[in-house]
Amino acid sequence: MTEFVADLHLHSRYSRACSRELSVSELAKWAKLKGIGVLGTGDFTHPLWGQELKEALREAGHGLYEHAGVLFMLTVEVNTLFYVAGRCHQIHHVLMAPSFQAVDRINQELEAFGNLGSDGRPTLSMEAWRLVEIVRGADPRCVVVPAHAWTPHFSVFGSNSGFDTIEECFQHQAQHIFALETGLSSDPAMNWRLSALDRYALISNSDSHSARRIGREANVFAGEPSYDGIMDALRTRDPAKFLYTLEFFPEEGKYHYDGHRNCGVRWAPEEARRHQLICSKCGRKVTVGVMHRIDKLADRPEGATPTNPIPFKRTVPLDEIIAEAMGQGVGTLGVDREYQALVYKCGTELDVLLKVPEEDLRRHASAKIAEGILRIRQGRVHIEPGYDGEYGKVHIFHEAEAAAAAAGEQQMTLF
């Protein structure tokens, strides 16, 4: 049966803090390099991007669209801002639609709640339940998924403006929520600690702000790509249809640990609790990260696994592996040249990261790059966890390891 990779949450150049080079053609080019079969369009509420999508995409059937051989699903991320019992909540959601007709109806309704042209990720003054009502009213096949569900700001379970349950957030529309996006700072295993989440499909997407970073998290399905096929796989959580997700090492996410970026304070949950969440440098409350928030709500211990979970694989973008192996920066000419050559020889980036046999890797790549890819597959990495908006750092060839190796070589020469 055919397998395909789907990354359904990303942005256009009309979203804040996103690459100005983002276009439909650029996204399609990188989707081919990465090995992504279905790509979200992002930002369909923005008038200018929406027009570009209508001009660039042709209907491919089955609720998907096509450009340059790549299939696209109509998607957008929106922020709902509302108050409950005097407390402000800002929650991000990914919307998915099977047609431009549905998108036009959604946009027409949402215009009453915010300026859709101000940002590709618009802020809407409305309750989360009302968003679900409007989106499903445009077409019952449309779907709302809570985005990056655990990040401190702008998420359904976030420590700063979220809720403790899906029902609190979506109220009478909670029955229509069947999938959650785990976000870069958490992975499925962390979410498995909450038995209340067993009934949801846990999906992963890149939330990419540049074409180069699409696919850094994604979902792998079996079957012929279609809108209804993907939604059915998520609703049923059928392991024969929804095969696995591709994940960041969650420590690499921007909000994994607690802390204060400006103060350089980064704490694991137990250390933050010892300090009563008060920064040891500035005396203000630290930003409570994803790991701490999951600890608070979990009713299962670490390592617990629900019945028949959808598995996952962790990976790191190929250019980051190459850059560390070569001792150069991501985006430099040497790294890009090596990336293009390796992908050309082996198929796609995801083939290189996940599927190409070891002997072929060692034949097509330098010894250190091949070793780096194999270490990622085996989870043999060293990570400085991210915190308070600062990405974590993954080290494949750790300084201490290199120093030990150098010392070993010196001893060999002495004796």
Image (tube, rainbow, N blue to C red):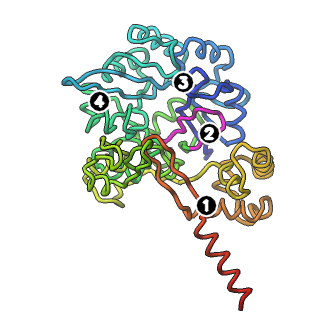
Q: Is residue 121 left or right of residue 329?
A: left
Q: Which residue is mark 2?
A: 213
Disc 3/disc 2 C-alpha distance (Å):
16 Å
Q: Disc 1 vs disc 2: which is toward the camera? A: 1
Q: Is residue 139 above or below residue 192?
A: above
Disc 2/disc 4 C-alpha distance (Å):
32 Å
Residue at (71, 26) in percent of width and height: 25
Q: Choose the circle earlier in sequence order: 1 or 2.
A: 2
Q: Which residue is mark 4?
A: 174
Q: Position of residue 115 (x, y in %)?
A: 46, 11
Q: Which residue is mark 1?
A: 396
Report the amino acid beneath label 1: Ile
Q: Position of residue 335 (x, y in %)?
A: 75, 48
Magenta extent? 204-216
Quick one: SS at disc 3?
A: loop
Q: Disc 3 vs disc 2: which is toward the camera? A: 3
Q: Position of residue 8 (x, y in %)?
A: 54, 33
Q: Is residue 171 above or below residue 133?
A: below
Quick one: SS at disc 4?
A: helix
Say which mark, if any, is on residue 106: none
Q: Which residue is mark 3?
A: 16
Report the amino acid beneath label 4: Ala
Of residues 37 and 389, which is closer to you in this image?
389
Q: Main secondary structure of the magenta part?
A: loop
Disc 3/disc 1 C-alpha distance (Å):
32 Å
Disc 4/disc 3 C-alpha distance (Å):
29 Å
Q: Disc 4 vs disc 3: which is toward the camera? A: 3
Mark 2, Cα crowd under 10 Å, few <14 / some 14-19 / many 20+, is some
Query: On the image, which quarter does residue 212 sit in?
Result: top right
Disc 1/disc 2 C-alpha distance (Å):
19 Å
Q: Is residue 200 magenta?
A: no
